[in-house]
Image (cartoon, rainbow, N blue to C red):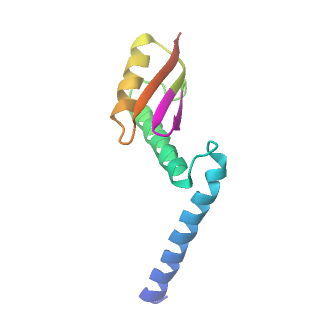
Amino acid sequence: MRSNEWRRRAAWLALATVIGIAGCASNGKPGQTAGAYVDDSMITAKVKTAFVEDRDVSALNIGVTTTQGVVQLTGTGTPEEARKASDIARRVEGVKAVQNNIRAK
């Protein structure tokens, strides 16, 4: 395959991916734009990834949802784990606020 043809196919694939993601916005919150839904999904993914990378926070026991940049933490954990989870979430780019609803074990 020639270089130009490969680039053209890659561009079409990228465009199709963006359109597909925007089409998934119907799964978002009512009144939420496709861009906001994608941004919130990325924030949620970054927070969960940060939990997985941290030894003191259980990514399995703490749920993360994001709406308009506000991260909500749910689940169970120790008071220290809940505090650390909030700190980690606050450091993620794009997070406007954190609501910590983690219950003590």
The secondary structure that most of the magenta stretch takes on is strand
- Relative to 32, does residue 23 appear above or below in the rendering? below
Image coords of residue 30 (percent x, y): 64, 43
23 left or right, relative to 39: right
Residue 66 inside the magenta-drawn segment:
yes
**In this rendering, does residue 91 appear at all?**
yes
Report the label total: 0
**In this rendering, does residue 56 appear at all?**
no
Q: Farthest residue in the left direction?
A: 91
Q: Farthest residue in the front direction?
A: 31
- Relative to 37, does residue 76 appear above or below in the rendering? above
Picture quadrant where residue 80 is located = top left
Query: What residue do we see at 63% from left, 59% from top?
Result: 23
- Relative to 8, does residue 75 appear above or below in the rendering? above
Residue 104 inside the magenta-drawn segment:
no
- Start-end of magenta stretch: 63-72
Query: What residue do we see at 43% from left, 24% from top?
Result: 57
Query: Toward the viewer: 59 or 99?
Result: 99
Image coords of residue 54 (percent x, y): 38, 30
Image coords of residue 61 (percent x, y): 55, 23
Query: What residue do we see at 49% from left, 82% from top?
Result: 8
